[in-house]
Image (cartoon, rainbow, N blue to C red):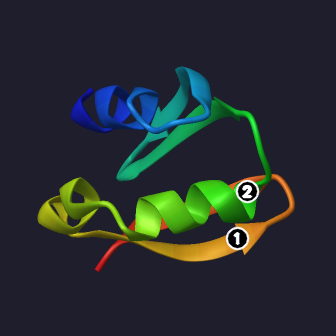
Amino acid sequence: MDLEDHLTRIQGVSNVTAEEFAGSIQNLEVEFDGDAMMLARALGKSAFLKEMGLKVRNVTKNRVVIKKY
């Protein structure tokens, strides 16, 4: 829930929806006005993600993968 709230505060994010939770994997759909690389850069600079122990691991055209480090 905290991550969803944080994502909605990022400029360009218009909606965040939890799609699936299985074991330790949470999939979120994020509607973002821009490409995935722009979102990944914003997430990479996020102190909140660092505090949660999360890091951007992979970026494709329409997907950003964040994992615990």
Q: Residue at x 44, y 59 (%)?
A: 43
Q: Which quarter of the image is occupied by the C terminus?
A: bottom left
Residue identified by numbered label 2: 36
Residue identified by numbered label 1: 59
Q: Residue at x 31, y 60 (%)?
A: 46
Mark 2 or mark 1: name the one nearer the start of the chain. 2
- Where residue 36 appears, as percent x and y from the top left, is 73, 56
- Where residue 67 appears, as percent x and y from the top left, is 41, 68
Local SS, label 1: strand
Q: Which quarter of the image is occupied by the N terminus?
A: top left
Give whichever of 12, 5 is nearer the camera: 12
- Where residue 45 appears, as percent x and y from the top left, is 37, 68
- Where residue 26 appears, as percent x and y from the top left, is 45, 43
Q: Residue furthest right?
A: 61
Local SS, label 2: helix
How many marks do you count on the picture?
A: 2
Q: Residue at x 77, y 45 (%)?
A: 34
Q: Is residue 61 above or below residue 17?
A: below
Mark 2–mark 1 CB contact (< 8 Å): yes
Please, what is the three-letter code of the amino acid marked with disc 2? Ala
Q: Nearer the viewer, mark 2 or mark 1?
A: 2
Please, what is the three-letter code of the amino acid marked with disc 1? Val
Which disc, if any, is residue 68? none
Q: Is residue 24 above or below residue 5?
A: below
Residue 15 as seen in the image, left or right of residue 68: right
Give whichever of 12, 58 is nearer the camera: 12
Q: Is residue 37 above or below residue 19?
A: below
Q: CA distance from mark 2 to mark 1?
A: 7 Å
Q: Residue at x 74, y 35 (%)?
A: 33
